[in-house]
Amino acid sequence: MTVNAPSERAGRHFLDVNDLKIHFPTDDGVVKSVDGLSFSLERGRTLGIVGESGSGKSVTSLGILGLHQGSRARISGEIWLDGEELVSAGANHVRMLRGKKMAMIFQDPLSSMHPYYTVGDQIVEAYRVHNKVTRQVARKHAIDMLDRVGIPQADRRVDSYPHEFSGGMRQRAMIAMALVNNPDLLIADEPTTALDVTVQAQILDLMRDLQRDFDAALIIITHDLGVVAELADDILVMYGGKGIEYGTAEDIFERPEHPYTWGLLGSMPRLDRERTERLLPIKGSPPSLINVPPGCAFHPRCAFEPRTGGKAKTEIPELLEAEGGHLVRCHLSREERRAIWETEIKPNLEATL
Amino acid sequence: MSEALLSVDGLQKHFPVTKGLLKRQVGAVKAVDGISFDVRKGETLGLVGESGCGKTTTGRLITRLTEPTAGKIVFEGRDITHMSQGRLRPLRRDVQMIFQDPYSSLNPRHTVGAIVGAPFRIQGVKTEHGVKRAVQDILALVGLNPEHYNRYPHEFSGGQRQRIGIARTLALKPKLIVADEPVSALDVSIQAQVVNLLEDLQNELDLTYVVIAHDLSVVRHISDRVAVMYLGKIVELADRKNLYSSPMHPYTNALLSAVPVPDVRRRTERERIRLQGDVPSPLNPPPACRFHTRCWKAQEVCKQVEPPLVELAAGHQVACHFPENAPAKGDAPAEAAATA
């Protein structure tokens, strides 16, 4: 995944992100929001991108959609979508792909819908950009779509304004808008963070059903490990603008190998296990992306940094394959990591009473 | 342990809705509509519920930041329900609040020293070695560097700001702390640090907490007892263990089963309860049992008779006509009759 030359990688997967860098020059220095990120995704699969605020997950998704073009961002690397390279493509070309080939569901449906137009008008507009049809045909299509995402009485609600919808219904309408052109790639950025837990469960169910029906590739970006565990086939954990662990959902939850992933799991109180006496947090706080620590970006917070013999402070570890597609960016050897997980981390996480 | 530090009885808060030039009242948002509970000395009481259920209003009522419409609040044996602001002043030392958003709850123009020192100034408290020394001790207690006394809030990260907010509440050694979503604005790894800090402080300083949160797993971790709210009412109140292992109210059941669980092996086999629709508006709540519009067990009686909050097992109160996991009839009828 990281070792292949660009030319070999082109078009081998449905989506291929290769050494993507998105930097923002500011008065205080260069903010390296995404710094050498690579991953791939197939149709019909769901990738969960997990990380804390400032880890670069949202910037990545906007980068794939080409929404940084025209801003001050400096973008390098390659994004291959279905055989086309997007970073070097013209703004107008990417614009034609947006909506039809790839679409996005934003976190806050109230601020990402236009308050002045009805929900129906906004879906009709999105549909007519890519399809030469009359208003009436598009409107019928919009009603079908709203019905599909579970909005009751869709033929009447199509004429409602966003403020007349509840939070959950607005998010359903957003999903309808994103899916109206039947995109091949759907990116959902914190799709349920603004919702109550019972409504969140409804939306997660809906997304799972829709993905199965539409056979799209889905990227779900979230800070909530519970949400990715519900939906994702594969998981990418990001820290300081880099991917630090990548694997199947089973790899990440059952056999995590990066100390940061261990920290995330230990920080989270869980309802499905006996209550632990204490949470096991990660010390310190996430790094500033202007002054990313030298060497491994995680080393100032890592409990196992002394065991690398000083290497973590000077050398940036490679994202290397541990086993069967499970990639880890860590200086510790595979054997050391497995031993630490089995003897020091796992027993504490599962400690009961 | 069983002594009540704070007791609340039939507390109500209705926000009037007015219309027109003359501000004619056309209705009321019944944010909190008749709730009763005790907070015992040294315990942590968790208040959970979805947005609009009245949990934040409850917190603001018991700290007397908003004026109650009806009901009674008793703190340490004194009725404080309608006490004047002047007479409340000494009480403010004992009851403090931690706010949700560490960005908007700290004055950006004041230094950390001024923020954490303000309670001493306002209450006119004399300290042995001066206010600066006292503030630095508290900063050290919450895990901040005492040398950061002269820094401004913008120089700190979210987790550190929340620690500043906690330091401010601790300044005058309060007895009761009401924490409104203390960790929900923080990153996961920082959440755990703050949760552990709150627990350590409770043990060291003998504090009593009322923790308001929407995250059921965080509430389970820190609370001794948990109250579940729905549309201004408490629907279930029980010990942590009983509430999470054998919830009786259908709403509690639905809430618990809606929480996404980070276990990939069991994601397909979990039995789920999916509620339909959204929470109704508190402006016009459903009559009788407020949950009947979304409840799968609802029958005719739920639409006509409001279920009272009764004790069905020891320390386990539920307001439901058809509770689940309830002990067989006849086990605790005497108790139930007594509390009803």
Image: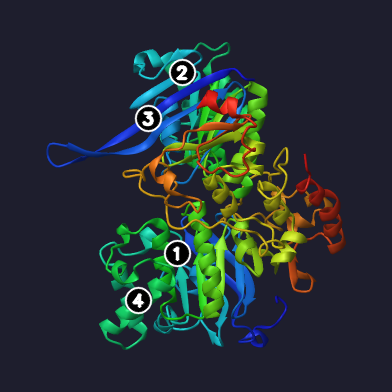
Q: Regarding mark 3 in the picture, which secondary structure is present there?
A: strand
Q: What is the number of callouts on the image?
A: 4
Left or right: A37 with respect to A255? Answer: left
The chain under label 1 reads A
> Circle 2 sits on which residue?
B74
Residue at horizontal 58%, vertical 56%? A223
Any mark on residue B12, and which?
3
Any mark on residue A142, and which?
4
> Would you place residue A327 above or below residue B152 in this image?
below
> Circle 1 sits on which residue?
A106
Instruction: Give the image's coloring scheme.
Output: rainbow
Left or right: B160 with respect to B279? Answer: right
Give yes or no for contact between labels 2 and 1 (Cβ–Cβ under 8 Å): no
Point out the image quarter for the C terminus of chain A.
top right
Residue under disc 4 on the same chain as residue under disc 1: yes
Q: Residues within 10 Å of mark 1 (few under 14, many from 20)?
A: many
